[in-house]
Amino acid sequence: MSWIRERELSFLERLTANILKAGPMPKHVAFIMDGNRRFAQKAHVQRQEGHSQGFEKLAETLRWCLNLGIHEVTVYAFSIENFKRSKEEVDGLMELARQKFSRLLTEQENLEKHGVCIRVLGDLTLLPADLQQLIAKSVVATKAHNKCFLNVCFAYTSRYEIASAVKEMAWGVEQGLIKSSDVSEVLLSECLYSSNSPNPDLLIRTSGEVRLSDFLLWQTSYSCLVFQSVLWPEYSFWNLCEAVLQYQLSYQSLQKARDLHREGQALQQMEEDRSCVAELLQHRGNGKLVDSQSRQKELLNYIASREERVRCFLNALQHKRDTFFSDLSSQAFICYL
């Protein structure tokens, strides 16, 4: 089964897609693909078959997203909490992942044609070594593609991601790349696994569960959340259209909330910068008053220095992450030669 199913929309589906695209469309959609096990029970098949059907539905859904002009998709493929399931089920999911990432490596021509970049978000060190290597090869092989993006959250939870981001900032301070005063909400966002992506506009969860299950908690604060009762393997083009319509109905209020949040972040950062400059001037001047022009000049210099420190830190962090994947990929190449 291909990662992107080659199938054209019917006339009615194309007509509906064109009508929807006349309104504001989400650029990034996240899916909690829930209901594979209940589908298997309903269809009287093995759980593993339910998960396999779930992957096939993902491939079909990616095609619908492309048809609708949605160029970034993030999916919750495997939670760290899933390791608590039975050994048989976990082993089956690991084997399914091996099969699908191995298949991806044979589909380079198709992925390049569509310009699909695959990113895997999570702590890969929690996975079997051979699967880590397969994933790394897949990520490196599609890294240069930039028409559309598929982010696969694997060995992931949002709280783990946020904790990891805090550790990355602590590493930056320890290395002397940034100061503790540089730590902020914006910088934490830049340290998340998803830092290369805009926050999702729309999050969809199937199977009727109305909770986020520790998925993209930070990133979806200002996203449209849609909960649908359909089981994931039974998901349809019309279910996706319904979710997009709900996003469009909420678009104005969501946009206003995002704008207000961005303004609040900017004001908070400016206040923190002014506070740091005031401390510096007080330390230098032994309590002497500084005129407003000199204070403004110091503020601008401080902001430029902070932004440069943060830029260098983020470059170092990205290099560390790229090196992790490239080293794993090289090991995989030796292993699978």
Image: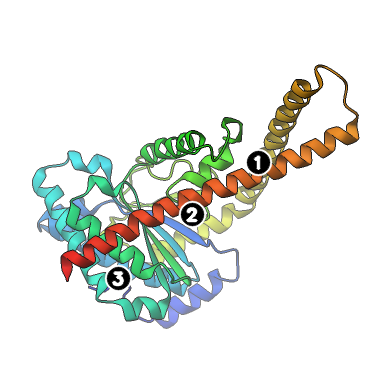
> What residue does disc 1 label?
306
* Real-space CA distance between mark 2 and mark 3, rounded to the nearest whole angstrom: 22 Å
**Which is nearer the N-term, disc 2 or disc 1?**
2
Which comes sooner in the sequence, label 1 or label 3? 3
Instruction: Check the image and report above or below for 197 versus 336.
Output: above
Q: Image point 10% across, 44% down: which residue?
A: 87
Determine the residue positioned at 60% across, 71% down: 22
Between 247 and 295, which is closer to the camera in this rendering? Answer: 295
Residue drawn where x is 31% and y is 55% of the image: 230
Residue 106, position in %: x, y?
Answer: 24, 76
Using the numbered discs, state the Cα–Cα distance from disc 1 to disc 3 in whole angstroms: 42 Å
Task: Assess disc 2: are there few (<14), some (14-19) or many (≥20) residues with their C-alpha within 10 Å of its C-alpha.
Answer: many
Amino acid carrying label 3: it is: Trp
Q: Nearer the viewer, mark 1 or mark 3?
A: 1
**SS under mark 1:** helix
Q: Residues within 10 Å of mark 1 (few under 14, many from 20)?
A: some
